[in-house]
Amino acid sequence: MPYDAVILAGGHARRLGGLDKPAEPVAGRSLIERVAAAVPGARTLVVVGPPRSGRGLERAVHTREEPPGSGPVPALRAGLALVTADEIALLAADLPFLTADHVTALRAAAREVGAAGAVLVDDEGAKQWLTGVWRTRALREALAGYGGRSLRGVLGPLEPVTVRLAAEAGGRAPWFDCDTMDDLDRARRTRVTSEETA
């Protein structure tokens, strides 16, 4: 089944001092390049945020939420407007350890009969709303009747299948995101250490 991918990359990164978080490097590649590499089979790759260049982003279609920086729900609306496939991978732009195999596992889980989608859960069981695969129609219907600002508020009622995937060697968890400088430093140390000991 063809699928599209939407990467949300337009936040203000306040906890990172306003850095362009998706452009921050981990082991020689930007965070957003790493996320784009996890969806090589996406028919359309939509990036919601400022246009960025990089490996794998040449094929991306860029759009912005209105107003820019207004949050994940407006960003999802903007990205979804460019989706034509029946299935969508919805991802944050700051997932350094997400791989194509992880997305494949999510796609398989999302095809469960009656499921609106599937999301990763972390090692504490918390749902990771920006690491998931969804039926496009379900997202559109949910957004049509939603006036709030919370991504969990729009996605939670869809009751997605939850997927628990083990962290790879060196603690590279697919749900790990870089919200703070400590997170970014950890990602850089983890990636370097795991590659040196491979």
Image: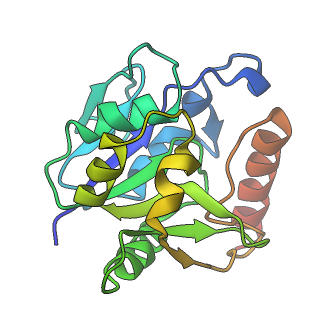
Q: Is residue 174 left or right of residue 84?
A: right
Residue drawn 61% across and 64% down?
Answer: 174
Residue 40 can be seen, yes or no: no
Q: Is residue 137 above or below residue 197?
A: above
Residue drawn 74% across and 50% down?
Answer: 187
Hey, which quadrant is residue 29 in on the image?
top right
Q: Is residue 79 above or below residue 36?
A: above
Decide which of 29, 13 is in the foreground and name it: 13
Decide which of 25, 128 is in the foreground and name it: 128
Decide which of 67, 195 is in the foreground and name it: 67
- From the top left corner, tell me how far across and down residue 103 is, in percent: 42, 68
Hey, which quadrant is residue 116 in on the image?
bottom left
Residue drawn 46% across and 42% down?
Answer: 33
Q: Residue furthest top?
A: 67
Q: Is residue 99 left or right of residue 194?
A: left
Image quadrant containing the C terminus: bottom right
- From the top left corner, tell me how far across and down residue 156 is, in percent: 53, 59
Residue drawn 30% across and 86% down?
Answer: 113
Q: Is residue 93 left or right of residue 194?
A: left
Q: Is residue 86 above or below residue 185?
A: below
Decide which of 164, 190 is in the foreground and name it: 164
Q: Is residue 162 above or below residue 32?
A: below
- From the top left corner, tell me how far across and down residue 100 is, in percent: 42, 67
Q: Residue furthest right?
A: 182
Image quadrant containing the N terminus: bottom left
- From the top left corner, tell me how far across and down residue 56 is, in percent: 33, 43
Residue 8 can be seen, yes or no: yes
The number of discs equals 0
Q: Residue furthest bottom?
A: 113
Q: Is residue 39 left or right of residue 150?
A: left
